[in-house]
Image (tube, grey):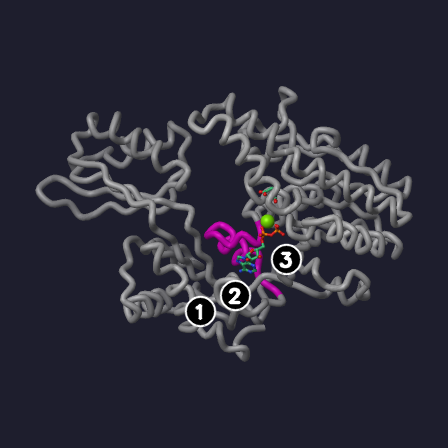
């Protein structure tokens, strides 16, 4: 008998019929003798619908009081899901009970809309499991010290599930979704993408941080920190397939390097359209300039990603960086109103129509020429690179967003990922 955590995403929970299929699958695992904790997302489209309503009522302002209410609104999607799933399990003859995050409780900090989990109390959950119930806990939700409901950021149910698995020392955390594992890139963009039977934790962390939304990055961080056995698999297989077969399907996140990983130079390609580029033009090139720009941005709680400072001419330089698109207008305002007057910069310009494409692979540690292959591939397709950033196992480029799919497809081919023989 094992303690297993299942997570089901929005599409997997997308209709009463899908929820019944999830209930049948979970009941199958429970009948096999496992203790089951299930963490579902809101039904697909529901979180967007709820946040859309909020925007209709109050479109402009963003402060803590507003963000608090966004969490009050957004968290309700998951409450509906857990209740429905519990009913469906009971209809299967499987005792079940559902909880909101605050009832467990899952405690977080107070960073509304992007809260971080601080602790999880498992006493209530364990008592229910011991009484033979399946326990269903809302994804995405938590509660802060002041008793306010919080949410964990978009895609945060992955993190709820892995955190619950870590807190309860679960034997395995299975992330059920609408694709049958982690692919070399998003299979919806590149149909030739191949499913990986395993992927190293480090690579998964990079892919998630560079935009592969198959797992929220914080869920991968949790899995790494607490060594949670983590697998991504499909909720669209027949619910009654043999448990042994199901338990081996999908993609396992591994913590040890194996032979296969040493072979692949580039394991995957990630992309995201969530960023915008801003350039502070003609800023006087003197010590402290990066701080006077980015210090002001950080003080406004805006995260910065890629940063490039150009060589200076005549004592002035251009300083470019990317921020999340949601923060774009706010950052430009901030720079125009405070940083430009304070530094004497000549202009602030920006471009929200960019994307970032990243190649990721542990093999990049020991192979030279990987980045140059990337740059050649893009240049062969006439794609201009605006910014470049690298780490030991990834190279990212910022390009015009209209070339995103072209770039991803070309790179997928150039690194041999279209070739079935090369990918396991
Ligand atoms: P869920 O609602 O189950 O959490 P998400 O939509 O958040 O599902 O994540 C699954 C989606 O992630 C897939 O439908 C796929 O389009 C996308 N995706 C992006 N990159 C990858 C990748 N490398 N492998 C698999 N799926 C990916
Ligand atoms: N329902 C939330 C979202 O849409 C959380 C999740 O799906 O993981 O972002
Ligand atoms: Mg998701």
Q: Nearer the viewer, mark 1 or mark 3?
A: 3
Residue 25 picture location, percent across and down = 80, 56
Q: Is residue 161 magenta?
A: no
The residue under label 2 is 184
Q: Is mark 3 within 8 Å of ligand 1?
A: yes
In-image side of 27 versus 80 (left or right): right
The residue under label 3 is 178
Q: Residue at x 21, y 26 (%)?
A: 342
Residue 111 picture location, percent across and down = 53, 29
Which mark sits nearer the N-terminus, 1 or 3? 3
Q: Which disc number belongs to residue 412?
A: 1
Residue neighbourhood size for the residue with mark 3, other residues' Cα within 10 Å, grouped as few (<14), some (14–19), many (≥20): some
Residue 319 picture location, percent across and down = 24, 42
Name the secondary structure under disc 1. Answer: helix
In what quadrant of the picture does the C terminus appear? bottom right
Q: Nearer the viewer, mark 2 or mark 3?
A: 3
Highlighted range, magenta? 198-215
Dots 1 and 2: beta carbons under 8 Å? Answer: yes
Which mark sits nearer the N-terminus, 1 or 2? 2
Residue lying farthest to the left in this orientation: 314
Quarter holding residue 117: top right
Ligand 2 position by quadrant: top right
Name the secondary structure under disc 3. Answer: loop
Name the secondary structure under disc 2. Answer: loop
Q: Is mark 2 within 8 Å of ligand 1?
A: yes
């Amino acid at each position: 008998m094992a303690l297993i955590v299942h997570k089901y995403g929005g599409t997997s929970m997308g209709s009463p019929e899908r929820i019944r299929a999830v209930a049948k699958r979970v009941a199958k695992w429970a009948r096999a003798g496992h203790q089951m904790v299930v963490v579902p997302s809101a039904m697909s489209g529901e979180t967007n619908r709820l946040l859309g309503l909020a925007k209709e009522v109050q479109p402009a302002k963003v402060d803590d009081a507003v963000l608090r209410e966004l969490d009050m609104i957004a968290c309700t999607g998951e409450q509906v899901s857990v209740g429905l799933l519990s009913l469906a399990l009971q209809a299967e003859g499987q005792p079940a009970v559902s909880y909101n995050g605050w009832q467990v409780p899952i405690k977080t900090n107070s960073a509304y809309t992007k809260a971080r989990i601080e602790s999880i109390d498992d006493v209530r959950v364990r008592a229910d499991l011991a009484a033979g119930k399946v326990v269903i806990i809302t994804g995405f939700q938590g509660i802060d010290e002041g008793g306010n409901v919080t949410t964990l950021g978009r895609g945060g149910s992955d993190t709820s599930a892995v955190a619950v698995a870590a807190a309860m020392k679960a034997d395995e955390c299975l992330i059920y979704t609408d694709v049958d594992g982690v692919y070399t890139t998003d299979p919806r963009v590149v149909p030739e993408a191949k499913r990986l039977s395993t992927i190293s934790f480090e690579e998964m962390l990079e892919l998630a941080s560079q935009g592969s939304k198959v797992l929220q990055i914080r869920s991968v961080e949790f899995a790494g920190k607490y060594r949670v056995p983590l697998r991504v698999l499909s909720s669209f297989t027949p619910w009654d397939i043999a448990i042994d077969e199901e338990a081996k399907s999908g993609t396992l996140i591994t913590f040890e390097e194996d032979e296969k990983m040493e072979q692949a130079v580039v394991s995957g390609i990630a992309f995201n359209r969530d960023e915008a580029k801003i350039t502070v033009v003609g800023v006087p090139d003197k010590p402290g300039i990066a701080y006077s720009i980015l210090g002001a941005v950080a003080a406004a709680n805006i995260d910065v990603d890629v940063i490039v400072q150009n060589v200076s001419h005549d004592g002035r330089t251009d300083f470019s960086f990317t921020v999340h698109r949601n923060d774009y207008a706010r950052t430009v305002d901030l720079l125009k109103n405070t940083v430009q007057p304070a530094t004497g910069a000549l202009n602030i310009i920006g471009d929200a129509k960019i994307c970032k494409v990243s190649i990721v692979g542990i093999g990049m540690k020991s192979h030279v020429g990987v980045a140059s292959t990337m740059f050649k591939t893009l240049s062969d397709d006439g794609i201009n690179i605006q910014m470049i950033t690298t780490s030991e196992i990834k190279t990212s480029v910022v390009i015009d967003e209209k070339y995103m799919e072209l770039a991803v497809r070309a790179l997928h081919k150039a690194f041999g990922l279209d070739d079935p023989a090369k990918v396991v």
